[in-house]
Image (cartoon, helix red, strand yellow):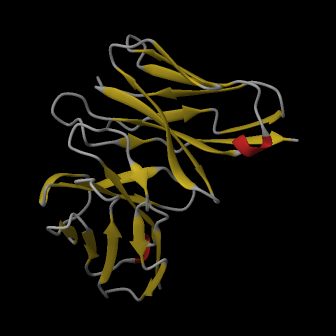
Amino acid sequence: EAGVTQSPTHLIKTRGQQATLRCSPISGHTSVYWYQQALGLGLQFLLWYDEGEERNRGNFPPRFSGRQFPNYSSELNVNALELEDSALYLCASSLETRSYEQYFGPGTRLTVT
Amino acid sequence: SQQGEEDPQALSIQEGENATMNCSYKTSINNLQWYRQNSGRGLVHLILIRSNEREKHSGRLRVTLDTSKKSSSLLITASRAADTASYFCATDEGGNNFNKFYFGSGTKLNVKP
């Protein structure tokens, strides 16, 4: 069974640009989560999508947004990039709304210069 | 916020010894989970304990939960070099925010061969 995949692996952008990160969940999983992990810190909850809808979001500004497609894959968009957005962005999926065990992808390393 | 906090921040032990790490959180929860992160395999789910459970075992892992003290501990028995990783606890916000997860900064475990 293929795991959660994320693309690209690395992304380098300059301040003010927009970044788009992609995630494909495990086949059959309907919930997708996005987290930000800054260097040396824990994961910060960004967004939760389930059945195509945004269900919850963390304490991040509106320039962090995303969507979930009918095939349950997801996209995270970060507009007006700032230097402090540099981090590892992790995507996770779970089988359904009440399945709390999350399966994580390898992450996208975003560097903002 | 609910952010869980692991303690200690770093732990170094010899192979074969037991490793204990703790997690404290601030508000009521539905579930608490432990995850492991290393460079080779990314973030992996280890064990979930529900708020009405006090202890749970999985192989060499033993997790306890004390909801009155808002704390949990993870015990790894007979540690191996392969257990070297960062360990995170993840909590939800309780109530209807059961899918909004908070991760601590982690405990870095180093198991020396």
Residue B72 position within the rendered picture, expressed as x and y whole percent measured from the top left: 49, 22
Residue shown at the point (37%, 40%) measured from the top left: A101
Q: Would you say B54 lies left or right of A22 here?
A: right
**Where the N terminus of chain A falls, by quadrant?**
bottom left
Number of marks: 0
**Horizontal relation, residue A91 to residue B110: left or right:** left
Figure check: A39 above or below A81: above
Left or right: A65 with respect to B15? left
The residue at 18%/28% (across/down) is B95
Give the quadrant of residue B84: top right
Q: Is residue B3 above or below residue B16?
A: below
Q: Is residue B99 above or below residue B27?
A: below
* Image coordinates for residue B89, horizontal then vertical, percent: 48, 36
Residue B59 coordinates in the image, percent (x, y): 61, 26
Q: Nearer the viewer, residue B5 or A45?
A: A45
Taking the spot 49% from the left edge, 77% from the top edge, the residue there is A9
Residue under the image location 71 percent in, 24 percent down: B77
Q: Position of residue B11 (x, y in %)?
A: 73, 36
Q: Quadrant of residue A3?
A: bottom left
